[in-house]
Image (spheres, rainbow, N blue to C red):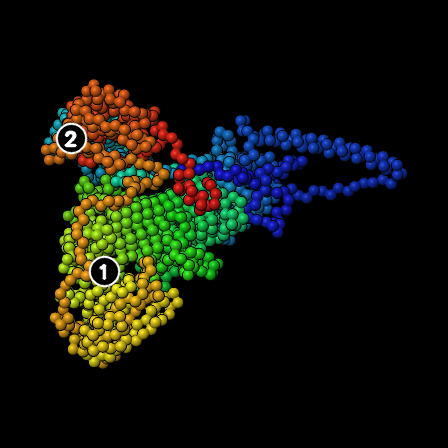
Amino acid sequence: MPTSDGPSHFPAFVAPSHGNHQRSPGYVPGRVAPVRLPPSAKAPPPPPIKPHGPPPNRQASFSLSEENQRRERAQILQRRKNTLICFGVSMGVFFLTLILVLSLRTGDVFDGNCPDHNTSLSIWNPGHQPDTDIVVRRGHLLRLESSATFRSLTIQSGGCVVFADSPDGSKNITLRTHYILMEDGGALHIGAPKCRYRSHATIALVGRSDNKAFPEVPGLGRKFIGVKSGGTLELHGTQRVSWSLLTRSVPASGLATGDYVNQRNFSRGINLRVVDQDTAAVLLSERYDTHEYYNDSRRLTQLLRSLPAGRIVALAVGDSAIKSLLQETKSAIEEKLGSSLVRDLKYRQAWALVSVVDGGKVSCTEDGREHENHDTRGRALARRNFTTVDGVSFSVTAYSEWKNGKPQYNHVGEIIDGVDMRAEVALLSRNILIYGEMEDSCYGNNMCRFYSHDTYGGHIEIFGNFSSVHLSHIELKNMGQQGENGRYPLHFHICGDVDQRGGYQEPTYVDGLSIHHSFSRCLTIHATNGLLVKDTVGYDTLGHCFFLEDGIEQRNTFYHNLGLLTRPGTLLPTDRNETLCISIKDKVYKGYTPSPSTECKAVSTFWIANPNNNLISNAAAGSQDAGIWFVFHSSSTGDSHGLVPDTKAELTPLGIFYNNRVHSNFKKYGCIYVYFFRFRPHQNADPSRPRVAAVIDNLISFKNNDLGAWIRGGDIIIQNSGFADNGVGLSFASDGTYPKDEGSSQEVKQSLFVGESQNRGTNAGQNKYWGLGGPDGKMRTLPRNRTFPIRGFQIYDGPVRLTQSTFRQFIPTPERYTSAVGFNLKNNWQLTPRNNLSQLSFHSTTFFGRPGQWFEENDLDGDKNSIFHDVDGSVTGYRDTYVGRADNYVIQHPGCVNVSRWNGVICSGRYSQVYVQTQGSAGLSLSISRDEYPNAPLVLRGINSQTGLSQQYQPILMMSKSYTLHWSGAAPRETVLSLINFDKNDWVLVGLCYPSDATFQIMADINDRQSNTFHDITDYGTVSSLAELEKRPMERKYFFDQETGLLWLYLLARNGRDGHSYCSVKGCERVKVIVTTSSKQTCNCTAKAYPKYSKTPSAVVPMPTLYKQPCQDCGAKQLVFSSEPWTSYLQTQIKSLSRTEQQRGDHSSFITVNEVTLAFSQPGYFLVSVDSCSGKVTSKNAFAKMDDKMEQYLRTGIPKRSVVLMATHGQPEDLVGVAPHLVPFGVAKAANLHTAGYLAFWGFRGGSSPPSWVSVRVGKGGDVLGLQERYLPLGLEAYGCKPPVAGNRKDLELLKKATGHCI
């Protein structure tokens, strides 16, 4: 995105003072001197390599004469002195003017904003002095005019170096050195914000890590640019768009030739591809073994003779093709493809051809190379460029050689199924380049056991109390040092506040940088606050790319940055992959092997260690593990440890998170992984103040191998977001669990989930899984593997509210289960019945799992307690019902509806949790039987280790029912039952199994977890029978039935609950049972309890009637979820009807505009015009055939500024005649429709340059186009629409809010 030149008050050039550079008591970092100094009466000083010595002392001479003679002589001397002064001033002005004129090149108008125009600068051509340490000090103001080489360059004490520029950008200055250091008033300038550098400037940082002859600089090491206290670094290259999104899809091109090594499976013979000239689609891919088989040669001849004119054909020889290649085949290749070389093709000769059928020799490109031996690397290469009817340029390449071909990718440039999947396109080159000179291979102690290439690059480090640092539109290449801590391509090191809070009039920023092929991160912000990082590209790095280091970094803003291809590094465990994790043990306890799954495998494009930072309009793609990872430290780490007493990160509200996109991240999480033991943000990070919800707005997440986003924490809202083609779209995990978590609210609203989109991907790259799937049942990339159960929204525990969202294209296959809403696999954690779903639009719904792959036995505690609340019936059709596991009878009644395809059951009722904690007995399982279903107990194993003496169970129970609880061993000495999510007066009656000799101490209390105190402590008394107990449920009473061994008591909530809190407003109501017994017998009382306490099943809340009407106001209001949310889009669907479909019984054809369907049933053509500014349908017309009436309509009947949609029904007459009439609507050329049966067309009337979305899609033969969907941008100025109203860019408004000023 282009950027402005910045505020006008920013000084373009800081000219250091000639005087002493001692700071005054009122010195403020960032305060700068005027742009230009007053003219000096002296000539500029000589270069610093030849400093002046002290001037010689002059001795004055006086004669002792008469007074009047003395006075006369004095007057004469004074007049002469005045004359000399005047002359000196005049000459000074003259020489200054002359210097200025000579210093400016022809046509270079003086500009006070340009640092190299400063009149105080001296021309500097130091040449190449590789063994000289240059020091630029006070009084040395130098303009570097030509390339130079130094051992080192230090600029200090008011010295200044400026790179010279030229108006035509013709200069090319390269500075090679081991390091450059600015300190104590030293400054380096290349360009300025209002006078950007136009020429080419290069700084090469040289040196090896093992060079003992060049000692390390303390705190900086080797091979660096350093800015210490008082230093200035201003680098500003030519402003260009840093990165953007594709505006149209670009298909993969080229002829994949396979393996030509002499192996059994080589592609011997002639490899052929036939490509459609209108769409670039590969129509045929075949190999003909003309070396071994004459029949293959005949088949090739027949194919070539049958191809229609205009088809593109590519041929390439593998190994050899000549032995059985018939003359008739050679003749066909000559006549149909225009070949000149095939006639003399020799044994094992490499030959490649690309041509157009019946295009003659002028359309043929071919190449041949003689074969010498098996090690020959000569390549026969043929390539031609073409254009589709949609105006997309593509090339077809054929090559023949003895080496492997490389796969290429499809690059999506459009919105698919409502989710913006456009690929990012980045510009890596800049006219200011800083790079590290590298060795050919790894050496020394540079992690050579893990990397074969040199990883000891250059680095830039900024220290605190610098004077001024602003970097824009520069390129950093081969930077970072993998084997060294703190040596990153760009590193702000313990700088404190670098914006107005730190006294910087112009806040520090990094803008438009390209950081690529780096060896240790991209950009590190360490104990630094208020930095703006904008329009910066980080590509192909080792370790976390954009990195907040120690957890105390706050108020930093990342705006419109792009991170691509983040690879594992070695510095931190989270940087490492599995191999690195296990191998690196230098900082690991002796004998301990790290666990890759829990301690490593987290390398991320954005690593955010404090929530109080802002991420706006960023993109993270292609990371080995995660796109964006939030990790919140309880205290600062690293060098910052102890700088602040407590970060309180887990209590700190989240900064701005808006319009970020993450995709194609391989192993873990596409987007956000918020990981902390508890994330519970409160106002001012004070737990006594109200909670503050963390808002994640307009997130786009697609094609991530595992989860699109994983969020752990409390009070988090995701809204206006799109998820597609992820293993799991989104999973929430709660703040924690009772008793450590006080309850929270997590919400997803106005969002779209797509299971498998029409973007089938490319079978290449990191993703190894390729199989059938999607709405068309074709081959596509798959997450995890072919059997992985894809889910849109995954319920982990809760509570979570999912509302006003749409789910599309969750389609199971014979090999895998798929569900729009599902649950965490193999889950032993708690779930809550307060998981609420409402106002949802489904194309498919939910699934509770079955025993088998991925689910294993499907019998852990969380698996069995899976449940959610269908608030309005939009999931099930039954309002205010709960959906749970079909085999969980604790939650059922006779009126429940079983849905076998879900393995689920729909029930009415009220449900809550009882949190059961036990002490004093190891390895216990808990069996819970409802008195109405005693033969179907719920058996829970607990979530703690089976060897521990304490255990916890979290069953979900239907309220107003009775239950018995049994143990798999001796009864626990102490049992605490806590009422979780109970509303006031909710109750259950429970009977706990104990030995007949047991005696009890039973008490109730309320636990205030904020103060960790207990109050309202009340002892329970006894009653003589269960019937008496049932008459007195509000009293603290219990009944022990010694005959059955059941201790009966009520769990009844006496206080109301607030919001999403687990417990009541007074605290957590509990009942504690302490038992005394000498028995060690297994306490399972089932056989004695039933049928004595059996009851007839009944419903407390009757089942509602099935609501059969379509859900009103369900689903997301948005149709498109775009990374440019300020742009409106038009949803279009075209369903043309072929004869093949008619024969199959399909008779529907229509055009849909923003979900309004316009059907047509008569054979012929159907056209719909839509105003491209407003999105309103302006006309719709049908024509039986391409006649004069239709031709006239196409010429004059469609108004300018119109989107034109065309569909066909059946096989209309004169389809070929339609092709030239589509060209005025933006088609690049008349499509070849001779073999077409029907088409779908998107065009545009008006404008000199057609939009990129113009497209013709053609059905041929028995092909079925099916429903074709496109999303077209509306209201563009390029259409002739009025410019958008200023101020409708929310991202810019948020950027202003985050930084305090416009950018």
Residue 372 makes an appearance in the image:
no
Residue in the picture at 35% in, 40% down: 1125
- How many numbered discs? 2
Would you identify the image quadrant in which residue 361 lies?
top left
Pick out the residue farthest to the front: 1031
Residue 1160 vertical position relative to residue 483 in the rendered view, above or below: above
**Residue under numbered circle 2:** 1161
Q: Is residue 112 visible?
A: yes
Q: Which residue is located at x 16 percent, y 77 percent?
A: 1043
Is disc 2 surrounded by few (<14), some (14 to 19) or many (20+) residues within 10 Å? some
Q: Earlier in the sequence, mark 2 or mark 1?
A: 1
Position above or below: 213 against 935: above
Q: Is residue 329 above or below residue 618?
A: above
Q: Secondary structure at mark 2?
A: loop
In front here: 15 or 249?
Answer: 249
Q: Residue furthest right?
A: 66
In percent of width and height, residue 1133 lies at 23, 35
Camera-side residue of 131 and 171: 171
Find residue 1160 and name its label: none
Question: Where does label 1 land, which residue?
Answer: 910
**What residue is rendered at 45% in x and 41% in y?**
511
Looking at the image, is mark 2 or mark 1 nearer the viewer?
A: 1
Asked whether, in this view, residue 1080 is left or right of residue 175, the answer is left
Q: Is residue 348 left or right of residue 5?
A: left
Quarter occupied by residue 677: bottom left
| Residue 515 location (% of width, % of height) | 41, 43
The residue shown at (30%, 76%) is 1019
